[in-house]
Image: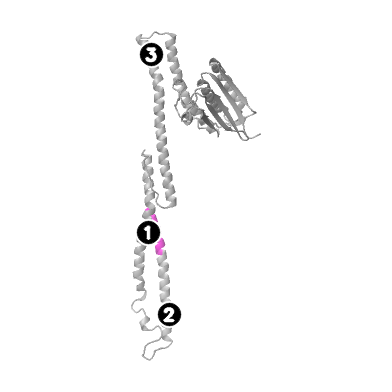
Amino acid sequence: MSTIRRRLFRSHFAVMFVALGVLAAVSLIGYAIFEIVDGVGGRGGDHRGPGGSGGGFGDGDDFDGGGPLFLLIPLAAAVLAASLVSVRVARRLATPIESMREATTRIAEGDYDVVVDGGDTAELAALAADVNTMAREIAETEARRLQLIGDIAHELRNPLATIEGSMEALMDGVIPATDETYAGVAREAARLRRLAGDLSALSAAGERVPGVERVDLVALIGEVVERLRPQAAAQELELSVDADGDATVEGSADQLTQVFVNVIGNAVQYTPSGSVRIAIRCGTHRVAVSVVDTGRGLASDDFERIFERFVRVDEDFADGTGVGLTIARSLARAHDGDLTATSPGVGHGSTFTVDLPLATPE
């Protein structure tokens, strides 16, 4: 299989030979015309001056003994020069391509610390920039993957250690086999089950359910609030919904339910006392659902960090898995929306806003 370097060299060489062929043909034709004109001038008369010298093309203007051979030296020089230029141009164009091939091979082998220089050719420079971007993004993805594995291992380690320690203590008779002991083991097992469910939901959070339907957002949020009302009542929280009209969106009712269960449930969990108010406000093309609580609040550095996997800004509430808001944001974005958080500061409550596009009128 021919390399690009050889093909570039051969293409330049072919162009060079065509150009030299045209040059040689033109030179030979010119030489032939010169010979004809010179011959005609010689037969037309012997125009000699007083000194016996000719006034026409004359013998001194002839290429006697040279003929077309006078072209060989410049042609040979042109071939040599064109060959050197072809080699340099082919090398200049092929070297960045070969570097990119080597870089992609290294990336495939797991080495992402590659930087490719595309040279001063616009197309090759753009391709090199794409290769460098790909390597950087793959490296970041791999780092996130390793971090996720470590986070999952950490989340699994605590409940498993608790279950293992409790069972060993029960078998050794160190602790009594009471309902309270079994309830503690059951809580840790439930925590593992929730983690498995959240991880499954997280893996599918970026995918849109094929069956898109029209969803009455006011009714859906009302159902979520009723589901969470017993928990709010146990904490003596005021839980209310205020909607300024109908809000119909297009998407998956199950996924949107999970979004608001996670967001409103998070607000209820992190609000020991006071209220959680949900406001549904419709614009021309979009609807904003704000969940305003009087709970712990957030520092400005936590506005984005709270959406990262396994992040809990308040370790006093360790029952959750730390991926609920991550899932909610991913599902909102899968519906062409978003989930954001703001807060006046720690101790002053938080506001979580889900922004979604309204459905087109029927």
Q: Secondary structure at mark 2?
A: helix
Give percent across and percent down for residue 114: 37, 42
Residue at the far right: name it: 362
Q: Amino acid at mark 1?
A: Ser
Give percent across and percent down for residue 270: 50, 21
Q: Which residues are magenta?
A: 5-17
Q: Secondary structure at mark 1?
A: helix
Residue drawn at the location 39% of the way across and 31% of the way down: 146
Asked if 67 appears above or below 165 in the picture, the reply is below
Q: Amino acid at mark 2?
A: Ile
Q: Secondary structure at mark 3?
A: helix
- The residue indicated by pointer 2 is 36
- The residue indicated by pointer 3 is 167
Asked if 270 appears above or below 211 in the picture, the reply is above
Taking depth in this image into account, of 78 and 131 the one nearest to the observer is 131
Residue drawn at the location 54% of the way across and 15% of the way down: 234
**What is the quadrant of the C terminus in the image?**
top right
Q: Mark on residue 86? A: 1
